[in-house]
Amino acid sequence: MKKILILALILTSSATFAKDISVKVSGMVCSMCAQGIQKKFSKLPEVKDIKVDLDTKVVSIITKDNQDIQDSKIKELITEAGYNVASIERK
């Protein structure tokens, strides 16, 4: 019984953490590119923070607790901004 209770506690507590999503984007070359992507994702209610690294071409998205963004939505927003998604990694 104790094992079940501990397992349930672990599973429910891990679900409350924010998600860290790294998106490798091709086509970003300038600070205007970064600003455009930041602006698009900042409007989403589930986004807590977003950073764009032009050197590595990675967009880092941190969601609010208990929230997520589907890969399809990420790809849609990046494509609308004029870029291509090379990969999406969740941590």
Image: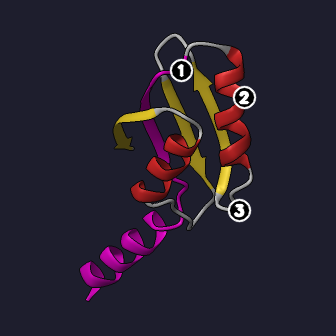
N-term mark: 3 or 2: 2
Determine contact: label 1, label 3, CB under 8 Å: no
The alpha-carbon separation of the residues under discs 1 and 3 comes to 24 Å
List the residue tagged with mark 2.
Answer: 35
Mark 2 element type: helix
Mark 1 element type: loop
Q: Is residue 86 magenta?
A: no
- 10 Å crowding of disc 2: few (<14), some (14-19), many (20+): few
Q: Which label belongs to residue 45? A: 3
The quarter holding residue 38 reads top right
Q: What amino acid is at disc 1?
A: Met
The alpha-carbon separation of the residues under discs 3 and 2 comes to 18 Å
Residue 8 location (% of width, % of height): 36, 79
- 10 Å crowding of disc 3: few (<14), some (14-19), many (20+): few
Q: Which label belongs to residue 28? A: 1
Residue 1 location (% of width, % of height): 25, 89
Q: Nearer the viewer, residue 59 or 86?
A: 86
Q: What amino acid is at disc 3?
A: Pro
Q: Which label belongs to residue 87? A: none
